[in-house]
Image (cartoon, coloured by chain):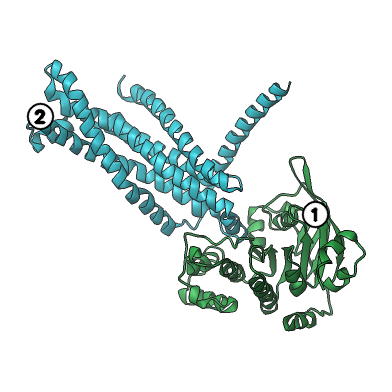
Amino acid sequence: MAEQELELTGWRKWFAEVGDQCVFFTRFFRNIFKGGFEWSEFIRQCYEIGYRSMMLVGITSFIMGAVLILQLRPSLESFGQVGMLPKTLSVSLIREIGPVITALICAGKISSSIGAELGSMKVTEQIDAMEVSGANPVQYLVVTRILAVTLMVPLLTVIGDIIGLAGGFLALNIKDSVSYTLYLHKCVASIDFSDFLPAFVKTIFFGFAIGFVGCYKGFNSNKGTESVGLAANSAVVTASLWIFVIDAIAVQVTSILFYK
Amino acid sequence: MEAVKEKKEATTKPKKEAIIVIKGLKKSFGKKNVLKDINLEVDRGENVVVLGKSGEGKSVTIECIVGLLTPDGGSIKVFGDEVTDMNDNQLKELRMKIGFLFQSGALFDSMTVRENLEFPLTRVLKMKNQQEIDERVNEVLEGVGLVDAIDKMPSDLSGGMRKRIGLARTLIIKPEIMLYDEPTTGLDPITSREISELILNMQKKYKTTSIIITHDMECARITSDRVVIMDSGQYIAEGTFESLQKSKNEIAREFFKDIS
């Protein structure tokens, strides 16, 4: 009996959480269109989120591009298809690996930092102070952050893809001698609209999920120092999970729309 | 002591007008009934101190007044309007007339003191003229004696300075009602006394009506026109500081036993 009650509580808790997220989403959505958009805070967040994550995304993408070439080379070499390396790299990087790796890095860096920042603001009553002063904390803290992440993650992905291709070029030239123009030509020639567009669109959803989860977890954390850590941790885990869910859905949608 | 005498003279009012009226207020958290039956009237220009042990729900009462918490029952009328029936816009308008000083000061730690003070002016009062904003900022900083701290970050300020800046930020929108949540907690006796006298001076300067939640007897003595004592979710004794000192109520006597 006690176990049944516990299970019921668990489900109730889950439904309550889903309900809370819906309410939070509605509050976010309503506040986008309310007057007085916080442009200065939005630009500051774009700088904090975009510019400050560029180095990490760049280094990771560079290594990822180089490692992919080094890993693919023996397999393709056995089929005598070394010439396919630039094409294989560019397709896999732009379609899948670039967006997902960039999004996961952003989930780790951005979602956790937003969760911790808003969580600590909640604990120290800064959000309550904003609310009782008559200001709108959702508009100032949530709308700006979610929109900034939604804008920055696709841009970081594009930058990451370019740097990843550069990493692949360097790795390719360890054993072979390929000119930059030939490499670039092979990479670009193998990519078409149906490779780039769905990948770009899904990064917008990745960005939104990262921002939304970070803000939701931080904004709804409990009042205790422990909850700041929990908010950050939970934000990373949930955002990462959402990235894979969105990716799985995006693959299905892309297949239906572009590869019938 | 001089400030106390002056305060007594200032509070001799010919006409009384209750601007906060609380009747039968109830609030529970889970199974714990924090507020059982709170009844309180606060007249315009009056300073009411609420004394009580920690965890008795003193702060919950003032959080209900500004709509941060929704009561389970009872009525709260501020300026004659029922707070529990207000929509978001009405609540926002009400909050523009109420200042709330949080226990920690709740300064926005990513902003300088200047930005903290400008925040309610630009976001709540929608002031655009920078000269007017600067004048208002300097005025309140002079009031709390911290003009030199204008470009400091909250992390560079001491506990007492944070409370002063918190008070300045609350007063900058010139509220008619001030709610203080344990304004002297965590401060040394000298700074506590300075803050208490500052509260009194600011009340005289801005002609505010105040509810001060505290368990600091010195703060209560300096700032109060009337003291109410809270125990087990109800107000059990009420009167001036001096009259409660002679009270036969056991809990009241406990509070006043160390006061000479």
Viewer-nearest residue: B253 or B167: B253
Q: Nearer the viewer, mark 2 or mark 1?
A: 2
Residue B56 position within the rendered picture, expressed as x and y whole percent measured from the top left: 77, 53
Q: Quadrant of the N terminus of chain A?
A: top right
Residue in the image at 47% along x and 62% along y:
B111
Q: Residue furthest right?
A: B248
Provide the letter of the chain coloured green: B
Residue A218 position within the rendered picture, expressed as x and y whole percent measured from the top left: 53, 45
Viewer-nearest residue: B11 or A176: A176
Provide the letter of the chain coloured cyan: A
Residue in the image at 47% along x and 56% along y:
A37
> CA–CA distance between discs 2 and 1?
80 Å
Amino acid residing under circle 2? Lys
**Can you see residue A54?**
yes
Label 1 residue SS: strand
Q: Is residue B59 above or below residue B13?
A: above
Q: Which residue is mark 1?
A: B75
**Can you see residue A34?**
no
Residue B167 position within the rendered picture, expressed as x and y whole percent measured from the top left: 61, 69
Q: Neighbour class for label 1 at 10 Å: few (<14), some, many (≥20)? A: many
Q: Which residue is mark 2?
A: A175
Label 2 residue SS: helix
- The answer for which chain carries disc 1 is B
Q: How many marks?
A: 2
- The answer for which chain carries disc 2 is A
Q: Is residue B238 above or below residue A211?
A: below
Residue B39 position within the rendered picture, expressed as x and y whole percent measured from the top left: 84, 58
